Image (spheres, grey):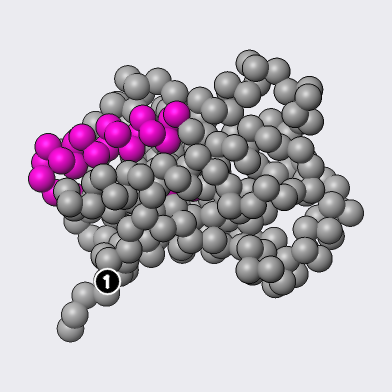
Amino acid sequence: MTASPFRLDGRAAAVTGAASGIGRATAEALAAAGAFVVVADLDLPGALDVAAGINTGGGRAVAVRADVTREEDIGAMLDAAPGGCPAILVNNAGRAIRRPSVELSAADWNKVVDINMTAVFLCAREAARRMIGAGTGGAIVNVASIMGLSGGGLYPNISYQATKGAVVNMTRALAVEWAGLGIRVNAVAPTWVRTPFITPILEQPDLVSRIEAMTPMRRLAEPGEVANAILFLASPAAAMVTGHTLPVDGGFLAQ
């Protein structure tokens, strides 16, 4: 019987921002598909909890504390994978500072740029260096946003929108540069997802209702729905897919 192209047996994956939300759901999905998962997050207790749950459930995972703006932390995160070279990297760690543009300080702008854009590049670069050195190739999946493909929004969020737009184009550029080396680079662009990341929005029922009304499927996404799209892009099922950003948005961008 032919093995499922969605299986990841024998492969290792590193997931950033994996202590909660989309990152947690992704770590769990990759582990369920057979991957050894490095659960990386600044929140070490949260990462340990995710890894413990995976291991208890019969999967394989290890937790590491990682500040993805620090190159030494990125190296240590990748070192935690068997052989120090994960076949899959999911760049999920992110930050948002929702503030009118004229009130956004340079310091706050840089905080978002450092995590949402620069760290994505640094993690991808270091993972690619190892994949190239090992001659194994691999798959990198970046977490962008519908706000990286649309300038619209229900509130000012300029640094988030700008950096997620950069992730979309970075994904294209790295995919073209590394395709001949066997490294695929793709991204997902989620809509609003029911996670702690959007707690300030979830606490405003009227705003949630507006979002639902703007979405053809009339609801927010769940973390597992985004994780399943990431699993596809990371798996052999997407062997001929690179340089693309897959919206997981209930039809939001189709309008």
Decide whether residue 102 is among the magenta residues: no
Q: Quadrant of residue 223?
A: bottom right
Residue 161 spot, x, y in % from top left: 63, 41
Q: Main secondary structure of the magenta part?
A: helix
Q: Amino acid at mark 1?
A: Pro
Q: Is residue 139 found inside the magenta-colored segment of the image?
A: yes
x 28%, y 26%: residue? 75
Residue 126 in the image, given as x and y percentages of width and height: 27, 32
Residue ranking furthest to the right: 206
Say left or right for 169 vs 160.
left
How packed mark 1 is, by other alpha carbons closer than 10 Å (few <14, some 14-19, many 20 or more), is few
| Picture residue at 32% right of the left edge, 44% below the top | 174
Q: Which residue is mark 1?
A: 5
Q: How many marks?
A: 1
State the extent of the magenta-drawn residues as a range. 118-143
Up/down of 215 relative to 126, above or below: below
**Residue 47, above or below 32:** above
- Badge 1 marks a residue whose secondary structure is loop
Q: Quadrant of residue 8?
A: bottom left
Vertical placement of residue 14 versus 97, above or below: below
Name the one closer to the observer, 84 or 176: 176
Position of the N terminus by quadrant: bottom left
